[in-house]
Structures are given as structure tokens and as C-alpha cells.
Image: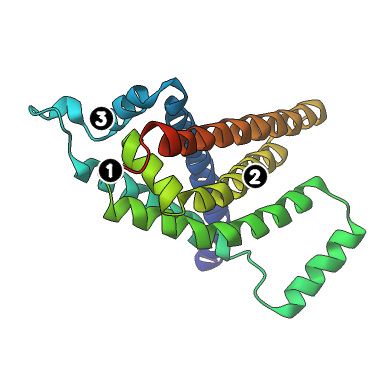
């Protein structure tokens, strides 16, 4: 009986772990996009954010430590791995499972199921794109300044990577928050309002991210040129 109870609690714990790690990653994405948007205030403002992330305030020379960025990347990578492991238990891996899901969605028109499918598709795309971004940050932790960032985006194909990663990460994260809201909010009206606000926040983050990316492109082409 004890083993049966322990087994039954396992999926519940994994469900909580999935939701908690997903919410933490979405919060990180929200903060990350706003820090990235400091470039809209000018290269100097972006460099000050990079200086803070490098812990330049703790360096007597004022340069900061690249290891701080690497530690942050490793922490986010660990959080991502936890989230992926928790998610994979529900991922349809066989043809019969995919067929059953397709039949279920054709019969039951439920917002939570549609959001789950959106998360599956965007999640697959993120599993391809995010490792590229993380490897870049691990191997080039010093390249957070305005000039090296704009050079990477304009001349090393970063515009394509971030142009693809932005929409799938925003859609995936906000769809996950919307599903959590649908699952845990017991009242109909707040549930409806929650979905509406998630759509608004998604549009806001997309616009913020696109404008920031375009500013990096502008800096790379016209402010710094090819001198980085």
C-alpha cells in the first residue's frame, strides 16, 4: 500500500516541478527581455547592464568577471533540463499516441488542449535553438557589451537565431502560464481574463524583443560599423 501511495504521488510531484520550473523560466525570459531592451536607451545603457551582470561592481579594476555570466548560464541550463525531464513524461512519442491526441482535439475543443499542442510545437523548436544560444554565452561570456553583441547579431547570423528564438520562447512561456492559470484558477471569469492578459503580455514582449533586436542591428550597421 505504501509503495502504491508513493507511486501515485510521483506524477503529482513531477507536475508541480514542471509548472514551477516553467514559471521560473518564463519569469527569467521576462526579465531578460527587459534587460536586453536597455539598448533602446543607447549603447552606454546596455554596457552598464552588461557591467552589472559581469559583477563589475565587485571588481576593483571595474571590468567584472566573465565567470559570473557562465554561472548564470549553467544555472539556467540546469533549470531547463529539470523542466524538459518533467515535460517528456507527457510527450507523445508513438504514432498511436499522436493519433489519439489528434482524435481527441477534433472532438473536444478545449483551450487547455490547444495551448498544450502549441507548447509541444514551440518546445521542439526551442530544444534546437536554445542550445545554440547557451553555447554562445558559455564560450563568449565577454560578448555581452553593446559593440560585441551588435557585431554578433549583424555579422555572425545572430539576427536569424534571435529572430526565431524570440517568438517561440515568448509563445511557449506565456502559453504555459496561461495553462497554469486555467488549471489552478477555480473561477470562470478570472480564467477568461487571465487568458486575455497572457495574450497582451505576449504581444508586448514580442514587440519589445523585435525593437531591441532592430536596435542592435542599427548599432552594428551604423554606430559601430565593422570595427568590432
Earlier residue among tags 1 and 2: 1
Between the C-alphas of marks 3 and 1, the distance is 11 Å
Is 154 in front, or is 187?
154
Which residue reaches farthest right? Answer: 107
Residue denoted by label 3: 51
Q: Secondary structure at mark 2?
A: helix
Q: Is residue 219 left or right of residue 128?
A: left
Q: Secondary structure at mark 1?
A: helix
| Residues under numbered marks 1 and 2 in contact, where contact means CB atoms less than 8 Å apart | no
Residue denoted by label 1: 69
Between the C-alphas of marks 2 and 3, the distance is 30 Å
Q: Is residue 8 visible?
A: no
| Residues under numbered marks 3 and 1 in contact, where contact means CB atoms less than 8 Å apart | no
- Where is residue 3 drawn, in percent x and y? 50, 67
Residue denoted by label 2: 171
- Where is residue 58 drawn, in percent x and y? 14, 28
Crowding at mark 3 (Cα within 10 Å: few <14, some 14-19, many 20+): some
Is 108 in front, or is 200?
200
Between the C-alphas of marks 1 and 2, the distance is 26 Å
- Where is residue 52 drawn, in percent x and y? 27, 28
Q: Is residue 35 visible?
A: yes
Residue drawn at (88%, 52%) of the image = 109
Quadrant in the picture for residue 190: top right
Residue drawn at (58%, 51%) of the image = 164
Earlier residue among tags 3 and 1: 3
Amino acid at each position: 500500500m505504501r509503495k502504491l501511495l508513493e507511486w501515485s504521488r510521483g506524477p503529482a510531484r513531477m507536475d508541480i516541478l514542471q509548472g514551477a520550473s516553467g514559471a521560473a523560466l518564463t519569469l527569467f525570459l521576462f526579465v531578460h527581455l527587459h534587460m536586453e531592451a536597455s539598448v533602446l536607451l543607447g549603447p552606454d545603457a546596455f554596457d552598464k547592464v552588461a557591467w552589472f551582470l559581469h559583477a563589475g561592481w565587485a571588481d576593483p579594476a571595474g571590468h567584472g568577471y566573465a565567470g559570473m555570466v557562465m554561472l548564470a548560464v549553467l544555472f539556467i541550463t540546469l533549470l531547463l533540463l529539470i523542466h524538459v525531464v518533467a515535460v517528456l513524461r507527457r510527450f507523445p512519442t508513438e504514432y498511436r499516441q499522436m493519433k489519439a491526441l489528434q482524435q481527441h482535439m477534433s472532438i473536444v475543443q478545449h483551450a487547455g488542449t490547444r495551448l498544450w499542442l502549441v507548447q509541444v510545437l514551440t518546445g521542439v523548436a526551442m530544444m534546437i535553438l536554445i542550445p545554440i544560444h547557451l553555447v554562445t554565452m558559455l564560450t563568449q561570456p565577454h560578448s555581452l557589451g553593446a559593440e560585441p553583441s551588435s557585431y554578433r547579431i549583424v555579422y555572425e547570423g545572430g539576427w536569424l537565431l534571435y529572430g526565431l528564438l524570440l517568438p517561440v520562447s515568448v509563445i511557449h512561456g506565456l502559453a504555459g502560464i496561461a495553462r497554469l492559470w486555467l488549471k489552478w484558477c477555480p473561477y470562470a471569469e478570472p480564467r477568461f481574463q487571465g487568458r486575455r492578459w497572457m495574450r497582451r503580455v505576449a504581444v508586448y514582449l514580442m514587440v519589445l524583443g523585435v525593437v531591441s533586436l532592430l536596435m542592435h542591428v542599427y548599432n552594428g550597421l551604423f554606430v559601430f560599423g565593422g570595427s568590432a
